[in-house]
Amino acid sequence: MLGLIWARQAGLDDPLRLRRAEATRRVLSLELNKDRDVERIHGSGINTLDIEPVEGRYMLSGGSDGVIVLYDLENLTRETSYTCKALCSVGRSHPDVHKFSVETVQWYPHDTGMFTSSSFDKTLKIWDTNTLKSADAFHFKETVYSHHMSPVATNHSLVAVGTKSPKVQLCDLKSGSFSHILQGKKYWQWLGPHVMNMFWQQEGSADGRVKLWDVRRASGCLSTLDQHNGEKSKASSEAANSAHTGRVNGLCYTNDGLHLLTTGTDDRMRLWNSFTGENTLVNYGKVCNESRKGLKFTISCGCDPEFAFVPYGSTIAVYTVFTGELITMLRGHYTAVNCCVFQPNFQELYSGSRDCNILAWIPALREPVPDDVSEKFLPQQHLNPAYEDAWSSSDDEG
């Protein structure tokens, strides 16, 4: 690390390299923070978490009790030990509270003044953060399992809603009405600016397929992911043209959008090329997955390599995304972990569980560097080879 700092100061190396190296070190040293608590508000399991992308300071949580809580993650006390306080909550006595379990909460991608929530009570609600009142609500005939907004779209304000019905509905926030419908299997989630993805069909009857959609073309999907990459001779009749042999209950794009991670109840996690739709065949081993609901996992940002944080029973498994190596298991919850979210500004991780707790995982403190360290101890191998001194005295010998 000292070599990277020296190279950056001397202008011999890319500053981004130092940033990635430090971010990677911090992620690899994540541990349960014993000095930071998150105020306990929920009376039942926590299903979903989301940190706003503007400042990375405020976090939403949604629970099986229908309660939504807004937290401030910043340490305003400047003390070593502190508690992340709940700024406000939509409790059971709130007039607009969800009647049943909240399955998904999401900040509006471009402004912290609004967030969305969906619930088993067959509604999608749009909230005004300042007044904590429901500004609009969309009602569905079937149970709502998930919803999502594109984090990068600027030309539209569509919210994709997945229900028990075999179709996905697109809600337009500008007009307050339904935009159009994509016909397909059950339970969907928005993945990108113009792409949809099928999760799983409920009640154990899923076919394990993952379909990619262009929302501008409602007539049919763009492609269906195949775990065998079209080699039908190696595929059984049941697994042919499917992403998993069980229900697909978790997915997440890498931050550059070039790859997609999916998890299924077949205890497998697969990495897909977003452009070609091919299974990259990365082996993550057995990824224990007994969840009957959506499993919300996350991927790091700004690291080299990138890491995936996946709920694994009562623990969180940390994998390298592109090699499949299991780095560590984060232990701290008492019961099954339902969700986790990554805070990229400070390389922190927050997780929610059925035990009603939200835990904060932060990088371990670095050991202080002695004052008597001189430049001769700096690791020169980190320098760009193009700037190394290749001069030799033998060049002057006749």
Image (cartoon, rainbow, N blue to C red):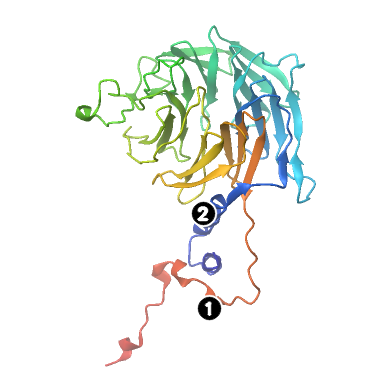
> Gap between marks 1 and 2, in whole Å?
24 Å
Under tag 1, what secondary structure? Answer: helix
Instruction: Examine the image and state in which quarter residue 336 appears.
Output: top right
Above/below status of 20 relative to 118: below
Can residue 43 be seen here? The reply is: yes
Is 34 in front, or is 157? 34
What amino acid is labelled 2 in the image? Arg
Residue extending farthest to the top is 141
| Residue at the image position 67 percent from the left and 33 percent from the top | 357
| Residue at the image position 62 percent from the left and 60 percent from the top | 366
> In the image, residue 23 lies at what x, y percent?
55, 52
Residue extending farthest to the bottom is 398
What amino acid is labelled 1 in the image? Lys
Residue beneath label 1, please? 376
Q: Which mark is residue 310?
A: none
Residue beneath label 2, please? 20
Picture mark count: 2
Is 339 in front, or is 332? 332
Is 293 in front, or is 90? 293
Left or right of 256? Residue 362 is: right
Under tag 2, what secondary structure? Answer: helix
Local packing at callout 2 (Cα closer than 10 Å; few below 14, some 14-19, many 20+) is: some
Can residue 55 be seen here? The reply is: no
| Residue at the image position 50 percent from the left and 22 percent from the top | 292
Above/below status of 88 relative to 281: above
